[in-house]
Every structure is written in C-alpha cells, then in structure tokens.
Image (cartoon, grey):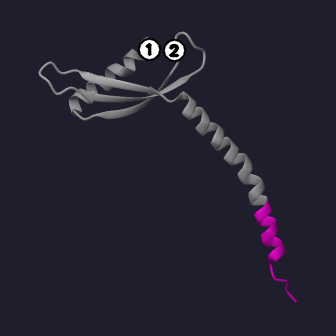
Amino acid sequence: MPALADAVEGIDRSIMDAGDPVGIEVAGQRADQIDERFWITYWHPLRSPSGGINVAAEEITERKRAEAALQGANKRSAAPGMRRRQRYEICRRPKTP
C-alpha cells in the first residue's frame, strides 16, 4: 500500500533502533477498494549482519466490523434494560407510613 510508505518508514526506523518485535494495527484503503480495511501487522527485526525487518500482516477488517456491530447492539440493548431495572427498583421501595 504505497499510501502508507511514509508511516512505515518511521516504524521501520524505531523497530530497528529498539530491536524488539512489535505488533501494530494499521487502517488504510487499498487502491482497488473503496472501503477502509484493517490489518494487524507483526514486525520482527532480523538479527543478522545485513539487518532488515520481517513483516507479516493479517487482515482483520471483518473482525473489526463485527466488534463495532456488537458494541452498537450492546449500547442499544443496555438502555432499555436500565430503564426496566430502574422502574423495578422504584416499585420495590418500601412504603412509608
């Protein structure tokens, strides 16, 4: 994804300096698609005289969409449940003489 080249260059340098593997979530748009896509990328510096970084990526777009849908459903279903519980608590209060 050429649009991410500048961001990757900074990540590349910091990983080589630190020398530790890193997992980074990346969002972007492929040239052949309209929708935003998501990936989790794993960056491992190569410990050899020539150096370099090995990068593996897993597309997680569908998982991200499912998480967003679940969060939206939870928000929608939580509000009515709260109202029912509040009404129940009001009805259960002891009567004062």
Helix or strand or loop: what does disc 1 sit on?
A: loop
Magenta stretch in the rendered image = 84-97
Residue in the picture at 63% in, 43% down:
71
Q: Which residue is mark 2?
A: 30
Q: Is residue 20 above or below residue 27?
A: below
Say which amino acid is labelled 2: Arg
Disc 1 to disc 2, C-alpha distance: 7 Å
Whether 78 is among the magenta residues is no
The image shows residue 49 at horizontal and vertical percentages of 11, 21
The spot of residue 34 in percent (x, y) is 60, 15
Q: Which residue is mark 1?
A: 1
Image height check: is 37 above or below 25?
A: above
What percent of the width, then of the height, locates residue 68? 61, 37
Instruction: Indicate the secondary structure of the residue bearing disc 2.
Output: loop
Q: Does the CB distance between marks 1 and 2 fall below 8 Å?
A: yes
At x 38% / y 15%, what residue is drawn?
A: 5
Alpha-carbon neighbours of circle 2 within 10 Å: few (<14), some, or many (≥20)? few
Residue in the image at 65% along x and 38% along y: 69
The quarter of the displayed image where residue 73 is located:
top right
Q: Amino acid at mark 1?
A: Met
In-front residue for pair 40/10: 40
The residue at the point 73 percent across, 50 percent down is 77
